[in-house]
């Protein structure tokens, strides 16, 4: 591989983009590309973009300005550089990216990245930029190579893509398309390949993963609970997680699985977005605050030892002080281990972008600061509650200090402990002795 062309991939956003970047790199490896972490060395630069976060497109254009300078400098010494913008910003912006950043050679939506090799060859042969943002009829997963050996003991595995919910603030149905679930046999094959390569924990991914409805080996439709039970039978696969979920698709079978499937970790990310029913209706969430609270109570009845995290948007159009207070009240009432909180920012093409009563930025910022203070308090309280407990920790990688390893608790917290390197990839009982802002400290106890 010494003479291989080099590809540099920069990933923005969610875990699904991390997964997609890994799959792109694997596919390009089969076509003679070796991954590099140095932008200046890259023959191919891929920006795998996310449109969820605030000013996502502008961040991409800012990066493209710097990459163009690298491309120009390499051209001066006779080296060609192909720049590809892939993912959700690519899908949303399309040809506008090439117009604003002429150095870009390829714009490819998230459903077509399996064609990168073909498209790179075309853009070189035709000496022009190409934009591929159609939703192809063929399923991309059928055209991707078998998973390469994992670099760690945990891995992401996409089982579902797209969303049919059409929340008024969200671009996912427009950038990822309608809901699609992979067949169980395909998911199992990929999971087994990961385990054979040393993976011990797999996180099942989907924009609306608990809406999974893939074809099973017996030709019936499998729910996410069915899939979890099926994958639990893989020897060597010790832990399963899934994200992200929608409250409307949290059915009784999946709730029960949290109580009776030991490999399914006691951690659930379940966004509620707002504690005010009028705002939830305007968001098209199709659940109320009371329904969300009732759902959480049912899940905790099945699995009392549950760490719950959520997503919250503050400053949605028309949100009043009282409605923001309802969000604080709901968060306080339920009790969360963690949360991802954001100021509302308009996404082009979404219904909320055109709504009246947009909340001023300073009001949104003040509300977000108040919410994040509460989030931090609850996160620290949850961590403090772990002190003195002995938790099974899957050690993933070396720590910053010699003789230190970092692992994950069942609740997805980082755990630091003094441990020999041979414990990497093992699940070890660790007595939690302290905590910091974002992690736990512990001492290994004899098994």
Image: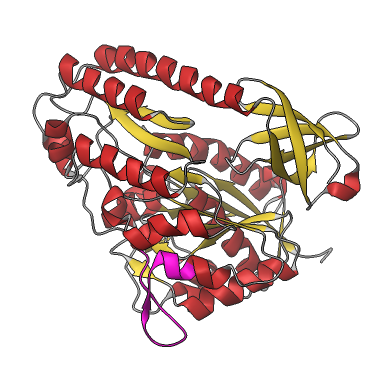
Question: Which residue does the image show at 37% across and 58% down from the upper left?
Answer: 210
Left-right relation of 52 to 282? right
Between 151 and 324, the one nearer to me in the picture: 324
Between 286 and 41, the one nearer to me in the picture: 286
Image location (x, y in percent) of residue 377: 48, 17
Left-right relation of 177 to 223? left
Image location (x, y in percent) of residue 158: 49, 62
Residue 332 sits in quarter:
top left
Between 76 and 95, the one nearer to me in the picture: 95
**Residue 415 in sight:** yes
Question: Which residue does the image show at 45% across and 38% down from the upper left?
Answer: 308
- Is 222 included in the stretch rendered in magenta? yes
Which residues fall within the magenta stretch? Answer: 212-227
Q: Is residue 376 above or below residue 266?
A: above
Residue 57 sits in quarter:
top left
Number of numbered callouts drawn: 0
State which quarter of the image contains the N terminus: bottom right
Question: Which residue does the image show at 32% across and 48% down from the upper left?
Answer: 96
Q: Residue furthest left?
A: 356
- Is 369 included in the stretch rendered in magenta? no
Image location (x, y in percent) of residue 131: 38, 62
Image location (x, y in percent) of residue 244: 41, 50
Left-right relation of 40 to 248? right
**Residue 85 in sight:** no
Q: Is residue 88 above or below residue 115?
A: above
Scheme of colours in the image: secondary structure
Q: Is residue 432 above or below residue 164?
A: above
Left-right relation of 305 to 102? right
Q: Is residue 17 above or below residue 23?
A: above
């Amino acid at each position: 591989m010494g003479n291989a062309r080099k590809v540099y991939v920069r990933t923005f956003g969610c875990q699904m983009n991390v997964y997609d970047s890994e799959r792109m790199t694997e596919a390009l490896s089969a076509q003679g590309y070796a991954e590099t972490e140095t932008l200046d060395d890259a023959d191919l630069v891929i920006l795998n973009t996310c449109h969820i976060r605030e000013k996502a497109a502008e961040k991409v254009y800012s990066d493209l300005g710097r990459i163009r300078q690298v491309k120009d400098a390499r051209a001066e010494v006779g080296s060609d550089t192909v720049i590809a913008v892939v993912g959700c910003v690519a899908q949303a912006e399309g040809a506008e990216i090439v117009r604003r950043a002429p150095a870009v050679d390829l714009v490819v939506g998230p459903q077509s990245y399996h064609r990168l090799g073909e498209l790179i060859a075309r853009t070189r042969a035709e000496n022009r930029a190409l934009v591929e943002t159609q939703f192809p009829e063929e399923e991309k997963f059928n055209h991707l190579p078998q998973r390469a050996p994992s670099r760690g003991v945990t891995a992401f595995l996409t089982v579902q893509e797209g969303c049919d919910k059409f929340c008024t603030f969200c671009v996912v149905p427009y950038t990822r398309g309608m809901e699609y679930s992979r067949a169980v046999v395909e998911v199992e094959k990929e999971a087994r390949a990961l385990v054979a390569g040393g993976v011990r924990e797999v996180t099942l991914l989907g924009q609306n993963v608990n809406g999974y409805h893939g074809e099973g080996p017996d030709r019936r439709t499998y729910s996410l609970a069915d899939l979890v039970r099926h994958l639990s039978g893989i020897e060597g696969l010790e832990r399963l997680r899934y994200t992200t979920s929608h409250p409307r698709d949290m059915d009784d079978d999946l709730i029960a699985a949290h109580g009776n499937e030991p490999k399914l970790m006691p951690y659930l990310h379940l966004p509620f977005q707002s504690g005010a029913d009028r705002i939830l209706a305007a968001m098209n969430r199709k659940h109320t605050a009371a329904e969300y609270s009732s759902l959480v109570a049912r899940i905790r009845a099945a699995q009392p030892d549950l760490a719950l995290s959520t997503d919250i948007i503050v400053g949605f159009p028309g949100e009043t002080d009282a409605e923001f207070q309802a969000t604080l009240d709901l968060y306080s009432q339920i009790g969360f281990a963690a949360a991802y909180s954001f100021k509302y920012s308009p996404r082009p093409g979404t219904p909320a972008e055109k709504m009246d009563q947009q909340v001023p930025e300073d009001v949104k910022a003040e509300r977000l600061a108040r919410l994040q203070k509460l989030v931090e308090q609850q996160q620290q309280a949850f961590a403090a509650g772990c002190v003195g407990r002995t938790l099974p920790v899957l050690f993933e990688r070396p720590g910053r200090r010699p003789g230190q390893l970092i692992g994950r608790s069942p609740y997805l917290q980082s755990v630091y402990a003094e441990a020999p390197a041979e414990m990497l990839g093992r699940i070890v009982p660790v007595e939690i002795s302290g905590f910091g802002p974002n992690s736990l400290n512990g001492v290994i106890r004899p098994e």
